[in-house]
Image: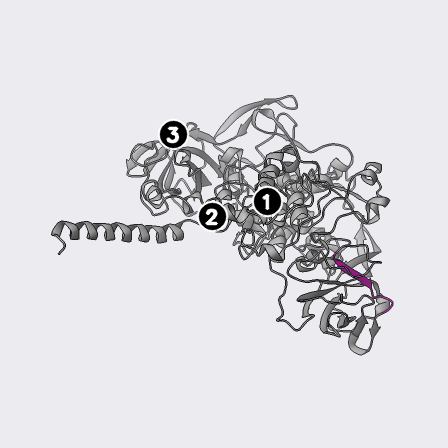
Amino acid sequence: MRTTGSLVRILGALIALAGTLALTGAQKQVYSKRDRAFYADPALVDFVRPGLVVKINSAAIAADGTITVTYTITDPMGLPLDATGVNTPGAVSFTYAAAYIPAGQEQYVSYQTASATGNALGTITRPGFVLGGPGTLVAPGQYTYTFPQKAPSAFDATATTTVAVLGSRDLTTFDLGTNIASNTYSFVPNGSAVKVTRDVIRTASCNGCHDQLAFHGGHAQGVEMCVLCHQPQNQDPVTGNTLDLKVMVHKIHMGSSLPSVLAGKPYQIAGYRNIISDFSDVEDPADARRCQTCHSQTTGAAQATAYMTEPTRAACGSCHDDVDFATGANHPGGIQNSDKQCANCHLPQGEMDFDASIQGAHMYPTESSLLSGLVVTITNVQNNAAGSAPVVSFNIQDKGGNPVALSALGSLSLTMAGPTTDYGTTSFGADVTTPGYVTESAVKTASCGGAGRCTYTFTHPIPAGATGTYAIAIEARRSETVPQLIDGTTKQTAIQYGAANPVTYFSVDGTPLAPRRKIIAEANCNACHVALSLHGTLRNNVEYCAMCHNPSNTDAARRPGAQVPSDKTAPPQGINFNLLVHRIHDGTNVVANGGKPYIVVGFGGSHNDFSGVGFPAMNAEGATRDLANCAMCHVNGSEQNDLNLSNLNPVTDPQGLLNPVQPFTSACTGCHVDRPAASHALSNTTQLGEACAVCHNADGEFSVDKVHAGK
């Protein structure tokens, strides 16, 4: 018979267990897999309550110009935090900014300024943010901060004023990183309603590529805070360049395509401690002509269409920086002494593409409404057993559903690869020099009937003895001539564009159909690239990319015709998709960490060096090249080491530290390029295969998501 004490102990244990389970459930809801807290001990999380929420409650400018802001800091559960870190874990440091929009203007002027000195402009006064303590405690978690600089004695009490507060909670002692959060608040000092705003671009547009838009070591976060300082009042005294956001951002994203850069003048900005940042090699992954990528109307920005309705010399001249509006040089409209006449010629949208309207002048060629379009669909694959030559039925039409003749195409090819468990080892004949797949041109040999219905019979059969599921894909391209306004004159211009790549799967032995695993979502690629298209617009489907960029393939076939002599004698470069994509996106980091420049010899022997590529994503502290958020590209948890190793092929990587390299190692060493990483992988690989999943599986102590969390 149990004693009362035993029952009490059992009841206590059950309550403690229930509390832990409840906390664990709450932990999973509050924190994502990108947060270190998601993986931390629930008891530690319950004590620390990591995370930070900043909410501005009110702000005011007194009659003598004193600017104050009252705000609250809490954890994600809504409980107040002690900024000193005494009563709640983790001290919080702060950054403040305050600015107003003068009457009749659209951009801010900062109330907080500081001097800066450089060779180009000497000593100037420019806006900035303020680093300070929390201010005066007025309630648990609530503080009132007084800005060090007052508004001028004759400040406009009717002007829209905006204050920003950014908090940085240091939880590194608990191995929970640094939590950063910010908030902005707009008001009119005399108490009237806010009527004028600056809401052109929202942070959500930027984060499609940048992930967590933050700069200045985490002291500035989000566009809403950036616009307070980066306005016409701001300049770089070292280079003389304006730091007005609409000019600076356009120039940064244009980078290597700026007329001034092409003419030999680099685009540079001096940052912290006057360290020069050179943006002359930046390439916008979306192409800077796609204005709507940043000026998105889907984010709710009130002035998202202002770039179309209010063109200005400063904004337009930032990209077209070879135009001199004062003299009229390189401007078909001649001299422009103000912005008043800009909208007369540059309407939001004209009567046709490629005219002088905003949309027309920035029309991306392959997206022009003047093009008939090209749509290819696969309708059937017959004679698809092992040892047989597949007969593929497909349609070729324009975007209106009308047939397109083969003679109108510049290119039409079909590719076959398999099995889908992992491409790369199948041989399609001694005459096929590309490992693992076969591509056949069909532009002259396909047979087409009415309505664009065509068939093509492969000359290379499916290998005898083949098993499982195979894939067939099509690429096609055409060229059309359309009128285009160039330097004020309408000229006929040829535009070459490709069709979307259809991919179809079929069983070669009667076993159930098994399409290739889905690792990357094309929509994720297009969050940055908008409409990813490579190899002369021929290839634009990641399912298709994987067929050729398989574990066995390299650029060996292109090396003999390389344009750069050293490329001819260098070993071939591995181009398996996981190796290639990781190395390309982490280009600058690969070299910085001791890896070789990733150089691929492409069509025509072209030399493609990706060592200058920087991934645009950031972490909360504003560090660039942040590839830690695997979910920006990956889907279905495919970054985890939980795939069937027996189905995956070793990766050929003649220039790598390991060759061949095992499949998981190939993916990880795409970014982790140093010798210790390669040695670690090698020491955990035996004749039985890789042991990565022991520690790095989805639930492992060092799972992929866990080791990348909070970075």
Q: Which mark is residue 133?
A: 3
| Highlighted range, magenta | 436-445
Name the residue beneath numbered marker 2.
700
Q: Residue at x 78, y 35 (%)?
A: 263
| Image position of 53 (left or right of 6) | right
The image shows residue 190 at horizontal and vertical percentages of 39, 41
Cβ atoms under marks 3 and 2 closer than 8 Å: no
Amino acid type at circle 3 is: Gly
- For marks 1 and 2, the one nearer the N-term is 1
Amino acid type at circle 2 is: Gly
The image shows residue 434 at horizontal and vertical percentages of 79, 54
Q: Which of labels 3 and 2 is toward the front?
A: 2
Q: Quadrant of residue 393?
A: bottom right
Q: Which of labels 1 and 2 is toward the front?
A: 1
Q: Which of labels 3 and 1 is toward the front?
A: 1
User: Helix, strand, or loop for circle 1?
Assistant: strand
Position of the N terminus by quadrant: bottom left
